[in-house]
Amino acid sequence: MRLLLVGDDPRDALAIREALAQTGGGDYRLEHAEGLSRGLDRVRTDPPDVLLLPLGPEGDGLAPLVQVRRKAPDVPIVVLVRPGDEELAQLAVKEGAHDWLTRARPDGELLQRAVRYAMERAHLTKELATAREQLNRLSLRDELTGLYNRRGFSVLAEQQMRLARRWDTGLLLLVLDVDGLDSINNRLGRAAGDRVLAETGQLLRESFRDSDIKARIGGDEFVVLMNGAAEGTCEVIDLRLTQNIERLNAGSDRPCPLSLSGGVAKWDPASGNGVAEVLDTAEHLMHEQKRGLAGKIDFGGA
């Protein structure tokens, strides 16, 4: 595995070689390019498996990372920062670095772990970007709400589950049903029902993160797939949705208020379940609420 260190300080190269030697890093070959311009030339002509890029608060800050990302967006990058520069490291990750380490006496095992993680993360990020590009080329959007349709949701949900298995993170799947849509269509007309559905789509965009997968998968049924299953997440979702629905109803001239029933299921990467099984669980909890067996937008079943 070829590692390319781009930096002016030869001590960085020495420290990395010593760290690799401590762990018997015979599978790794470190190359050193002194200066950013030489490093960019090497990256363009012969891309390494992973690029090691020292950063510091002095001088250019994140500028070297920005240049590398612009010239070689697909190359995995591990940035090296001085002790105490953790804030700079976090900014670098937001700017596109795949991992970071401290420059002072790097640990060999941590270095190899960071290299493997950077490669895996870069590969999976590229896979996800490819999947999103495919969605953009295909007709996988719901025309009325602008959210993904059932097919689009299935494609992205499967991709998100693959990522979650790699990173060992849980997911939450929320199913929402618009209460009384048939009655609205019968009493007020199809246009009124379409307006309710469009407003529900906007409600979900305002209530959830851009990274959450939001879709309309049926006539009056919506789903949201959320990354992470931290303690208290369901309660936060419950409060946010309730407040946003109340605000939406207060500012609307509709003759009938918007009301939703919901169910949410947790997905564990070790469970082996797919999208269909988790969706069935969440739908079952939602139907229990509609039959009066659960409270209004009650996520206690998660």
Image (spheres, grey):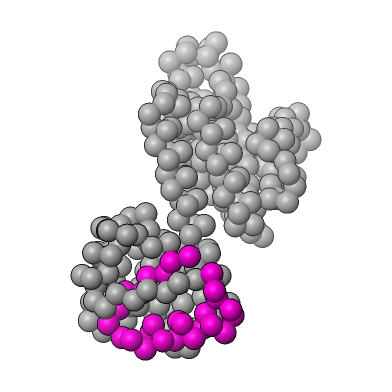
Taking the image as drawn, is residue 253 in sight?
A: no
Say whether residue 226 is left or right of residue 14. Answer: right
The boundaries of the magenta stretch are 1-27
With 156 as the anchor, is 43 left or right in this view? left
Q: Is residue 176 left or right of residue 143?
A: right
In percent of the image, x 31 and y 86: which residue is there?
A: 9
Above-or-below relation of 49 to 290: below
User: Image point 60% across, 22% down: which residue?
Assistant: 180
Q: Which x, y percent locates residue 111?
A: 51, 75
The quarter holding residue 297 reads top right
Relative to the observer, which residue lies in front, 36 or 177? Answer: 36
Which residue does the image show at 38% across and 32% down from the upper left?
A: 136
Q: Residue at x 42, y 33 (%)?
A: 134
Q: Is residue 5 above or below residue 131?
A: below
Percent position of residue 287, x then y = 72, 30
Q: Is residue 31 magenta?
A: no
Of residues 180 and 215, the one nearer the viewer is 215
Residue at the outermost right position = 293
Residue 184 locus on image (x, y percent): 54, 17
Q: Residue 41 or 208: which is nearer the viewer?
A: 41
23 lies above or below 172: below
Identify the image quadrant of residue 292: top right
Q: Decide which of 285, 49 is in the foreground and name it.
A: 49
Instruction: Reply yes or no: does residue 18 show up in magenta.
Output: yes
Residue 108 in view here: yes
Q: How many marks?
A: 0
